[in-house]
Image (cartoon, rainbow, N blue to C red):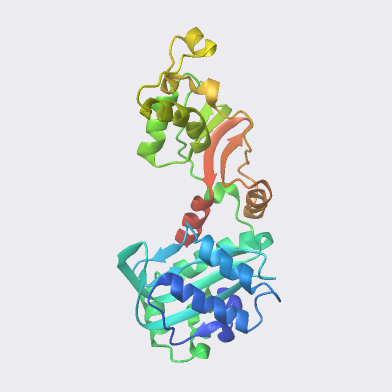
């Protein structure tokens, strides 16, 4: 499968008239709806996704393009819509960033592997100045669909976890305090951290869920003036009422969904969809050898040669 196979001239708007990326995305979605690419009666679902689930991993390719992407059952198969504006389109989150090319990618959840590869494929070709110039010079949808770079990109079919994971794993030890691990997660800007024993074997994981569960009640209690909460029996036994001093082994999640290095991108995508999980420790014979998140998938695919 090549990138050109997902670019339909009927879904190309030249010129695209929009002031913001979200407005451009809405115009492109309207084109998909008008051409029947969106399932019958599913227009409202697609519009609701765009309104309420703006993609946190939207790819911005320098000053050249924006790639909003969504997974939704509003479409029967992966579809794309391409818009090229005569004037820069502003990104709402950063008024200093703008681009003239917006490519909307929409896929049903079952096509997540292909969807991730298509996002990465577009990001790679848009990092090439010649391709960008060719797109900006296009006057018709047919000229856009015939851009040579679209025919040159072959989408890989058998990427594995080993190809995409982050091998340098940030990990915590069971004896570390929850406060120390929370500070580490904030400092490194991560939403989850595996907990390993002395041999590197996975024993649990700490996520934002655990931080909120144990730290927020104490914070709220401390911010109420004039109130005192007596320590619990467990707190007395461990000698402190401060949840930040709790050892990680007492608060970590012990049931952790893991993946192996040899699992395919399709396997991981299915786990993400079916289990509603977007980050996994990668283990080899029980020992953590990597970590994989949905954002990692996007970044690796974008950077792939």
Q: Quadrant of residue 135?
A: bottom left
At x 48% / y 9%, what residue is drawn?
Answer: 236
Q: In the rendered view, tell whether residue 285 sits above or below residue 86.
A: above
Q: Quadrant of residue 223?
A: top left
At x 39% / y 73%, what residue is drawn?
Answer: 20
Q: In the rendered view, tell whether residue 206 sits above or below residue 262.
A: above
At x 63% / y 50%, what residue is drawn?
Answer: 272
Number of residue marks:
0
Q: Nearer the viewer, residue 180 or 135?
A: 180
Q: In the rendered view, tell whether residue 280 sits above or below residue 228.
A: below
Assign the N terminus to one quadrant of the image: bottom right
Q: Nearer the viewer, residue 141 or 277?
A: 277
At x 45% / y 18%, what residue is drawn?
Answer: 229
Which residue sits furthest bottom?
139
Pinpoint residue 33: horizontal percent, then vertical percent.
61, 79
Pinpoint residue 271: horizontal percent, then vertical percent.
66, 48
On the question of residue 181 being in view, the answer is no
70 relative position to 62: left or right: right
Pinpoint residue 245: horizontal percent, then vertical percent.
42, 19
Q: In the rendered view, tell whether residue 245 sits above or below residue 55.
A: above
Q: Quadrant of residue 64?
A: bottom left
On the question of residue 300 being in view, the answer is yes
Pinpoint residue 164: horizontal percent, then vertical percent.
53, 50
Which residue sits furthest front?
226
């Amino acid at each position: 499968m090549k990138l050109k196979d997902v670019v339909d001239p009927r879904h190309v708007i030249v010129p695209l008239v929009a002031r913001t990326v979200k407005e451009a995305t809405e115009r492109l979605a309207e084109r998909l709806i008008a051409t029947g690419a969106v399932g019958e009666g599913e227009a409202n679902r697609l519009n609701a996704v765009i309104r309420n689930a703006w993609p946190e991993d939207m790819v911005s390719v320098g000053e050249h393009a924006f790639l909003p992407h969504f997974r939704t059952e509003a479409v029967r198969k992966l579809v794309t819509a391409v818009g090229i504006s005569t004037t820069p389109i502003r990104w709402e989150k950063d008024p200093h960033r703008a681009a003239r090319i917006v490519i909307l990618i929409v896929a049903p959840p079952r096509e997540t592997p292909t969807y991730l590869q298509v996002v990465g494929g577009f990001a790679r070709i848009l990092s090439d100045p010649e391709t960008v110039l060719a797109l900006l010079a296009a006057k018709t949808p047919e000229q856009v669909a015939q851009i040579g770079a679209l025919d040159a990109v072959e989408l890989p079919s058998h990427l594995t976890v080993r190809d995409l994971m982050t091998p340098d794993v940030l990990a915590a030890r069971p004896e570390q305090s929850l406060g120390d691990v929370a500070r580490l997660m904030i400092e490194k800007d991560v939403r989850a951290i595996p907990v390993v024993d002395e041999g590197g074997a996975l024993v649990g994981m700490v996520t934002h869920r655990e931080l909120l569960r144990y730290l927020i009640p104490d914070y709220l209690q401390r911010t109420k003036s004039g109130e005192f909460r007596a320590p619990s029996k467990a707190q007395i036994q461990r000698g402190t009422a401060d949840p930040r001093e709790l050892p990680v082994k007492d608060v970590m999640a012990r049931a952790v969904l893991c993946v192996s290095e040899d699992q395919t991108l399709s396997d991981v995508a299915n786990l993400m969809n079916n289990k509603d999980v977007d980050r996994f420790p990668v283990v080899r014979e029980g020992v953590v050898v990597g970590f994989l998140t949905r954002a990692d998938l996007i970044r690796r695919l974008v950077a792939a040669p």
